[in-house]
Amino acid sequence: MLSNETPKYGRWRQCPCSLAEQRLADLKAMLNEMRTERDAWREQAQRLSLPKPNEQLKTAWWRSAGAVGGMTALRRTLDYVELLGRVVIAVAVIAVALRLIGI
């Protein structure tokens, strides 16, 4: 190129290839930064995550309620509810029967 000729891409412009290479380098740097941030977040999440509960902790509240074997308190409660339901039905039947006889 002679000194009086203007360059193909202008005096201050860069070649499209070098622009693409620069953009690619910027994108690679951004990707590396995102990876390091992801790893940092993953480490923090693992640090703050709750430990897996063991079987002993799962049934501890049953034992504190006075249950032996875990499900006894629940069965006892369900038995009381069923008994209460039968009592309510019996009282309703008696009330209807008394009304029918006129008392």
Image (cartoon, rainbow, N blue to C red):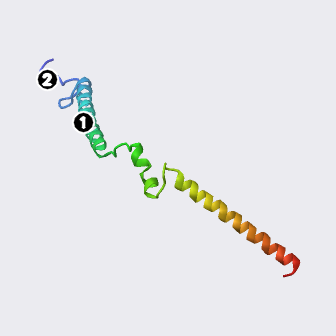
> Does residue 55 lie above or below 32 as drawn?
below
Residue shown at 21% from the left, 30% from the top: 13
Compare residues 15 and 1 and report the one nearer the observer: 15
Label annotation for residue 4 = 2
- Tell us which disc is closer to us: 2 or 1: 1
Q: Residues within 10 Å of mark 1 (few under 14, many from 20)?
A: few
Question: Residue 62 at x, y = what percent?
Answer: 46, 54
Compare residues 49 and 57 and report the one nearer the observer: 57
Quadrant of res 23: top left
Compare residues 7 and 64 and report the one nearer the observer: 64
Quadrant of res 37: top left
Can you identify the residue that label 1 sits on? Answer: 36
Report the side of 72 relative to 43 (left or right).
Answer: right
Question: Residue 54 at x, y = what percent?
Answer: 39, 43
Where disc 2 sits, the SS reads loop
**Image quarter in which the N terminus is found:** top left
Q: CA distance from mark 2 to mark 1?
A: 50 Å
Q: Residues within 10 Å of mark 2 (few under 14, many from 20)?
A: few
Question: Residue 90 at x, y = what percent?
Answer: 75, 68
Where disc 1 sits, the SS reads helix
